[in-house]
Amino acid sequence: MGPYIETEVKNKPQPQPQLQAQTQQPQTPPPPKHQSQPQPPTRQQSQQHPQQQSQPQQSQPPQQQEVEVAIKVVVEYEQPKPQSEPPPNVNVREEKLFMVSNLNEQNLKRFNIIVGSFSVENNARNLAKSLQTNYNALVVVNEKGMFRVIIASFDNYYTAKDTLENSIKSKFPDAWILARN
């Protein structure tokens, strides 16, 4: 999803325009051409325009409205999909592994935390048995005949690494990650 813009328009309250009273003087007719001096308005003329004299004319300025616009730019990035493989600069040992007993091979994932490695199968089984109360320990063998004791297995390298660093290393300082190929 790309960036988008949200806008919000707010009307700013405007003060009411103040009306100014303007008085308009009655217009006197131009003096007749034959008279030389202007004459005051007659009573009839002044009675014809009494309202004009007392009522102010209201002029309204054109209304202007200020508009306040708030613009908010929102950029959304897709979260990177968690990588299941280790970064290229991290060397993780890979081995082809086989289950020693007829246990369900679905319990064995790509990244495995190893707490013991033995050349004698019985030693690996004894360690796995002692760990059964707290872990679902598995015994596997690689192509070279080394027996590995696994206490946790993950599809994602980073999950395996976090688990190793945050909970396993304190109990098993020599534990390490083995990738199954």
Image: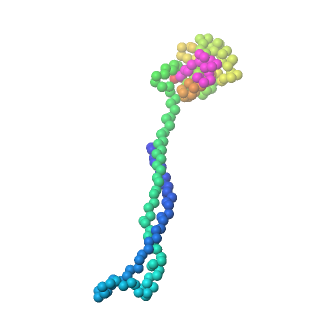
Span colored in magenta = 164-179
Front one among 171 and 121:
171
Residue 177: x and y in percent read 55, 21
Number of residue marks: 0
Residue furthest to the left: 34
Residue at left 51%, top 19%? 93
Q: Is residue 2 above or below residue 24?
A: above
Residue furthest to the right: 133
Q: Is residue 30 left or right of residue 156?
A: left
Residue at left 65%, top 13%? 122
Residue 95 in view here: yes
Q: Is residue 48 magenta?
A: no
Residue furthest to the top: 120
**Quarter of the figure with residue 130:** top right
Residue at left 47%, top 80%? 51
Residue 139 in view here: no
Residue 86: x and y in percent read 50, 25
Q: Is residue 175 magenta?
A: yes
Q: Is residue 103 above or below residue 71?
A: above
Residue 47: x and y in percent read 45, 85
Q: Is residue 60 above or below residue 10?
A: below
Residue at left 48%, top 65%? 18
Residue 90: x and y in percent read 49, 22
Q: Is residue 163 left or right of residue 79?
A: right
